[in-house]
Image (tube, rainbow, N blue to C red):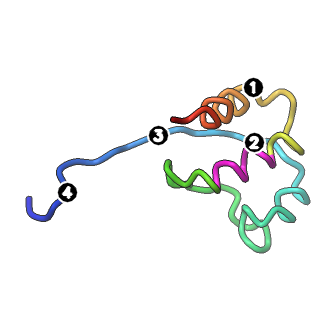
Amino acid sequence: MGGGRRGYNVVLEAVSIHLPVGVGTRSDLFGHLGDERVKLVDAQDWATIDEFRNLRRAHGSADDNEAAEFFDFAANRA
């Protein structure tokens, strides 16, 4: 295999954030019209991850324990 790439980093994590539709639409994190209900975020795109964390904190369900754990872990990244 050519090129300078010596391997791949693969991170798979599904995080569900339960929000009212209007909140998701107004956030602009789900497309301009809220039509992108599922988002793929680069694992090193800390700015976008932080935006989702802040959205979950402000408007997410208190029952989203797995999402809270993920964002707590992401916030403590090295």
* Residue holding disc 3: 12
Circles 2 and 1, Cβ within 8 Å, touching? The answer is no
Q: Is residue 53 magenta?
A: yes
Residue range (magenta): 48-55
Please tell me whether residue 10 is drawn above or below residue 30 in the rendered image: above
SS of the residue at dot 2?
A: loop
Residue 15 spot, x, y in % from top left: 64, 39
Circles 3 and 4, Cβ within 8 Å, touching? The answer is no
Task: Give the residue displayed 9% in from the left and 63% down from the top.
Answer: 2
* Residue holding disc 1: 65
Q: CA distance from mark 2 to mark 1?
A: 10 Å
Near mark 3 (Cα within 10 A), the count class, few <14, some 14-19 or many ≥20, is few
Closer to the chain start, of discs 4 and 2, is 4
Q: Nearer the viewer, mark 4 or mark 1?
A: 4
* Residue holding disc 2: 17
SS of the residue at dot 3?
A: loop
Quarter-wise, where is residue 72 in the image?
top right
| Amino acid found under the numbered disc labelled 3 | Leu
Q: Nearer the viewer, mark 3 or mark 4?
A: 4
Marking on residue 5: 4
| Amino acid found under the numbered disc labelled 4 | Arg
